[in-house]
Image (cartoon, rainbow, N blue to C red):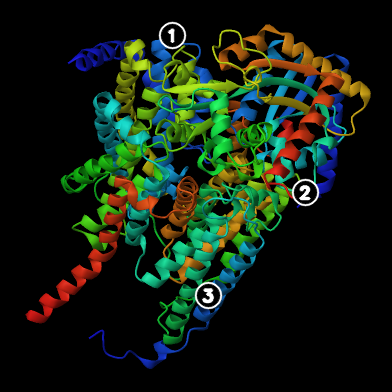
Amino acid sequence: MTPFHTRLLGAAVALTLVTAAPALAQQLELKVMAPAAPGGGWDQTARAMQQALVAAGVARSVQVTNVAGAGGSVGIAQFVNGAKGDGNQLMVNGFVMVGALAMNKSPVTLEQVTPIARLTEEIQVIVVPANSPLKTAQDLAAAVKADIAKVTFAGGSAGGVDHVMAALFAGTIGADAKKINYIPFSGGGESLAAILGGKVTAGISGLSEYDGQIKSGKLRALGVTSEKRIPGVDIPTFKEQGIDLVLANWRSVMAPPGITAEQKKTLSDAVEKMVKSDAWKGILKQKGWDDAYLGGDAFADFLKKETVRVTDVLKSVGLVKS
Amino acid sequence: MSDLPQDPASRRVDPAGVVIALALAGLAAVLVWDASQLQSNNPYGMGPHAMPIVIAVGLGILAIGNLVEALRGNLPERESADPKAVWLILGGLAMLIAIIGLGGGFILATTALFVTTATAFGRRAILADLVIGLVLTTLIYVAFSRLLTLSLPAGPLERLF
Amino acid sequence: MDAFVALANGMAVAIQPMNLLYALIGVLLGTAVGVLPGIGPALTVALLLPVTYKLDPGGSLIMFAGIYYGGMYGGSTTAILINTPGESASMATALEGNKMAKAGRGGPALATAAIGSFVAGTIATIGLAFLAPWLVDFAVNFGPEDYFALMCVAFVTVSATFGNSPVRGLTSLFIGLTLGLVGIDKLTGQARLAFGIPELLDGVEVTTLAVGLFAVGEALYVVSRRHHSEEKLEPVRGSLWMTREDWKRSWKPWLRGTMFGFPIGALPAGGAEIPTFLSYSTEKRLTKHPEEFGKGAIEGVAGPEAANNASAAGTLVPLLTLGLPTSATAAMMLAGFQQYGLNPGPLLFAERPELVWGLIASLFIANVMLLVLNLPLVGLWVKLLAIPQPWLYAGILVFATTGTIAAKPSVVELSMLAGFGVMGFLMRRFDFPIAPVVIGLILGPIAESQLRRAMSISLGDPMALLQSPVSATLLAIALIALVAPFVMQGLGRFKANED
């Protein structure tokens, strides 16, 4: 066998030459990691970025890589270790990763990556079957206070955004979050069936997932988690019903640790340019995602606050040991 | 006919069977230990330990069952195997894993496996197989990365594309 | 009958020459991508969806249907020819299908798979058209306790895959159940048997286990015995096509497979694995040639393949009537519909009947195309087996590892693949059956989470399992299936004594 390392070194040198050249020409060659299997939400976001970055002329080429595993814990570990200081790499992530890292006792945390921007978000909703006696969020709150064990919530995986929301709901109305009877289902389809079949009291999910059911009258929405009413959606917010529950399932994009301020600015500018492009707007419309662009330090602050909030909630339900 | 006592030689204790029984018992013990590390944070219904314990009990019973079979010598006859060929393929798999782990890329890794496997199956033309392996895996790599935009691990060879 | 008129209209659109061409291209692309390792039907559809963007809605819908069916058939092709099931639904196909291929009967195996898929797809499509509203009420009312009872039926019937010794068969099953525990517990988010390795938190991938046990294990076993008898593969022994006997032995399994696949596929958590294995077990029990099972019985390919295809059509029931995507593939199809401004849900049948019936007609046409395209290709596929043994097995191993590398290129995952290969080799050597391991890995976690969900809802009251009529009935069936063989055996002995 030929000496393997020499070749490796040669390739590395070649790569740096290749990647350095286009930076001069204001033409990026980017690698975007989706820390999930192909097909999922993060992968779709990464591929949408790929499409929009190239279409908007921000980058000459974008390559998407998938590193699946444990809610992104495997991907972020590889990203932090493997892409350190590389100004041409990005990683997609979101709300779910915050909880996953805490629950899996991941040695790598979100503080180690360089936040670039929040891209999209989805508002959450609580629904009950049409024949349920519960009419408003306050009815549900009363039922939870009366006997918390008997109120079953169906939603996504343990520690995910739906679970966090159930715990926040209980906490906000003054019930014991630790005692919520939350039943995780894999995939929205399965939990929706359980709600429609009346197997559980209420269901929690992203609004778009239950949109059709709500419009057709098979499900009744008790409230949405947005700050203000969503235009065109006839569902009251929790806030206007006197329950201070504001939450969104966001997706964002991160850069590796150890990049220079200049590299960070290049990437931030590229993402900002992409978000403003028609290509990106077209994709958002096609996929039904809401634009929630938040860049720079504002996003870094937001990320810190979300991390604290989610970790506290997960501690309160016993998913993360304090 | 078949109920008559068989040739006493085949009724001897089968050491491999005893090893299998011990391994199953060990697995059961690992399950119980692992389950004891879990905390039940679900106040309703069954906790996460119930299933591991049930399976551990089952494995324990099966360990006894396999031990009885082994002591009676009820395991099937085994033909002599060719350990060299098996180790050659396992070596190929180990090389594959090492090359991927060290960042040598998809083409080199799978070519290594191709050549060792072909050799294990009795071929002696390593150079020819090397070329065939390289062509085959390069085609696969191009199909995945160019046509499907799925990225396989890249090493020195992949970067040439 | 409005439905008939609507279906006829849909057909009229789908059968236009241009649309037939799109269907053909779709099937061709779908099959080509579907045979690639590690790419199941869901990913095939995901990857090829952009191709359909450029066409008008009618054309893209029909090409989409073609890609979908082609992707499914591609997975079965690799399962039969090289023992490398691309997804868990074609696992049962690999059991007998690969044995048939090795015995020179790969042609009939591929043919019965294609025709069985067609028959099942057609019947299930008709079922979708006429039974959907009724079936969906039943499906939605299927609660966790009912799923658990269904799992019990499945567990009892898997003994058909147990091989020669119940002790060794159960041992295999329990090893599978143990592997099913690995990873994050779905209900409490805690890690079990992960030993602090992050890659293990997602659990053992079914395809990694199956490809390790089936393909890698087989290669190791064959090479270890090479000096005994040079195994000569004859690609074609006897007829390349299905003989009259093959037809006779296939048509009933096709129908029975459809009966399992369609209703279970329509259940939101039904999936394709349970019906394929139920079909395999049933065929093994009912066959007139029990001696051929394990050596390549055509019934064991015909039934599971029909069940697989019918369950795929079944998942369209909740998707079209409720907007419920109940599988990864269904989720991709939902994405496909949305690009035509089609929002599946309760109102779809009422608001856009022409699109729904157009889709159903497209599925039917795509199914026909699959048959037209793939039957002539059977001869070509089978030629693959004529490759000299060293290259054939080297190619199989490259193919098998590529699947894992494409899905998860990590050292841990590849080590697991190699480890399962060694396990498959040892299990073959000591005559432990392999299928129960995979079944345990698939069914164990489902049974556990459904039972625990049921217990959470009933606040720990086990009587909930008997209070639902569906679950009580299914549990009774499981009990009968468990006891019946012993009773029959007793009766048999009783009779024998009388003689």
Q: Name the residue beneath numbered marker 3.
A: B20
Q: Name the quarter where the C terminus of chain C is drawn.
A: bottom left
Q: Residues within 10 Å of mark 3 (few under 14, many from 20)?
A: some
x, y (%) of residue A10?
A: 84, 38
Q: Name the quarter where the N terminus of chain C is drawn.
A: top left
Circles 2 and 1 on the same subunit: no
Q: Amino acid at mark 1?
A: Asp
Q: Residues within 10 Å of mark 1 (few under 14, many from 20)?
A: few
x, y (%) of residue B134?
A: 63, 42
x, y (%) of residue C345?
A: 41, 20
Measure how far apart labels 3 and 1 are at the Cα level: 61 Å
- The residue depicted at 42 percent of the width and 57 percent of the height is C435
Say what secondary structure mark 1 lies in.
loop
Report the front residue among C234 and A265: A265
Q: Name the residue beneath numbered marker 1.
A: C56
- The residue depicted at 25 percent of the width and 11 percent of the height is C9
Report the front residue among C34 and C252: C252
Q: Amino acid at mark 2?
A: Ser
